[in-house]
Amino acid sequence: MIKYLGVEKWGLWKSLCPPLVVAGPCSAETEEQVYGTAAALKAAGIGVFRAGLWKPRTHPASFEGVGERGLPWLVRVQRELGMRVATEVANAHHVEQALHAGLDLLWLGARTTANPFAVQEIADALQGTDIPVLVKNPVNPDLELWLGALERLERAGICRIGAVHRGFSAYGEMKYRNLPQWQLPIEIRRRCPDMPVLCDPSHLAGRREYVREIAQQAMDLGFDGLMVESHVCPEQALSDAAQQLTPAALGEMLAGLVVRQEDTENPVYKANIDELRSRIDAIDNELVDLLGLRMEISAQIGEYKKQNNITILQTGRWEKVLERVLARGAEKGLDAGFLERIFTAIHRASIDRQSNVMQDGESQGENV
């Protein structure tokens, strides 16, 4: 298990917990835009200001940031407004320039996290420093790639490391710009319990009207904070205009968020939750026992098919099983997609078990 300094050790955010909030425009565009947005955010209670200087874009004709020219703008925010400042880095040169300017926080974007060579280059450039670094999830839902990026930074001696969940790319029409797939950041939290995990509701949403609901869901799941895009005049933004909030709107959103606590000393709550969890544990044990029994029967069916030279896959049978399960699930108020995922996994495991029986002649098969 990777070990990181906990949230309480992140000195620059100590006074801002909970939740931790990093906010600012997608891109630094002009000094006036940067300073104006930062001043408005400070008035809204934000202490950490973010702005992208180097912007990795899909098409070269897109606005790719002002680069090093914007560093003095962030330093001015830092000096005159007393805010901590952060920017994205994608290579060693970016790191060197940001460190030289004295920025307070760096983050790796989704495209950088997906490239182990780039992450290693950044880790090498950061060696010997103690600057906090956030790592956004890779573009595609690859948990090990995300963990690998965090590990590279840890091996470079960076102690203050955090993860940022910004969602995962997918094709087709969707409500949000990126798929949440909350199970991945939840697994990050399980494997690295002391590491701060933030949510980027702006990139998840893709549209400002959905930012609030995603931010609240992150709070409900116990995330440590948010990284939100905010622009003093979003409709004029040179990048990601549709997902940015005005500082005033962001302040209103944050004021309306319900921040959940991890636990309580309320004895009534503890008694009730313990009783309900005991019931859940008993049901889980029954589920495992039933799955074990199902697989034993699957193995017997696999052996019988082998003896009679019958194919493993019986498409008609699988369709009937799924139809029956979904109908029964509907009676119980269960989501059809949820049930289909579960029984598809069981079906696949059954096929694997029967394949073992066919190949080895051992009673280790699976079936539907």
Image (cartoon, grey):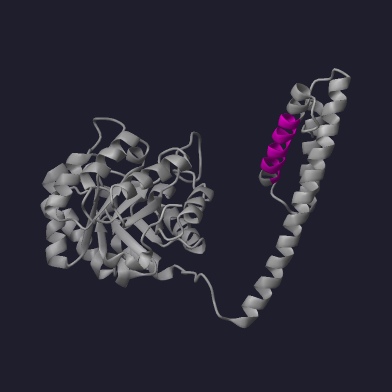
Placement of the C terminus among the 4 image quadrants: top right
Work out whether 239 lies above or below 331: above
State the extent of the magenta-drawn residues as a range: 339-353
In-front residue for pair 303/218: 303
Indicate whether residue 219 is drawn in magenta.
no
Image point (76%, 24%), residue name = 360
Q: Which of the 4 image quadrants contains residue 73?
A: bottom left
Q: Is residue 11 left or right of residue 328?
A: left
Residue 262 x, y percent position in the rendering: 51, 69
Image point 14% across, 48% down: which residue?
A: 70
Residue nearest the viewer, comparing 322 with 161:
161
Q: Main secondary structure of the magenta part?
A: helix
Whether residue 48 sits left or right of residue 101 in the image: it is: right
Answer above or below: position of 101 versus 169: below
Q: Position of residue 177 (x, y in %)?
A: 44, 43
Asked whether residue 362 is in view, the answer is yes
Residue 161: percent from left, percent from top: 34, 54
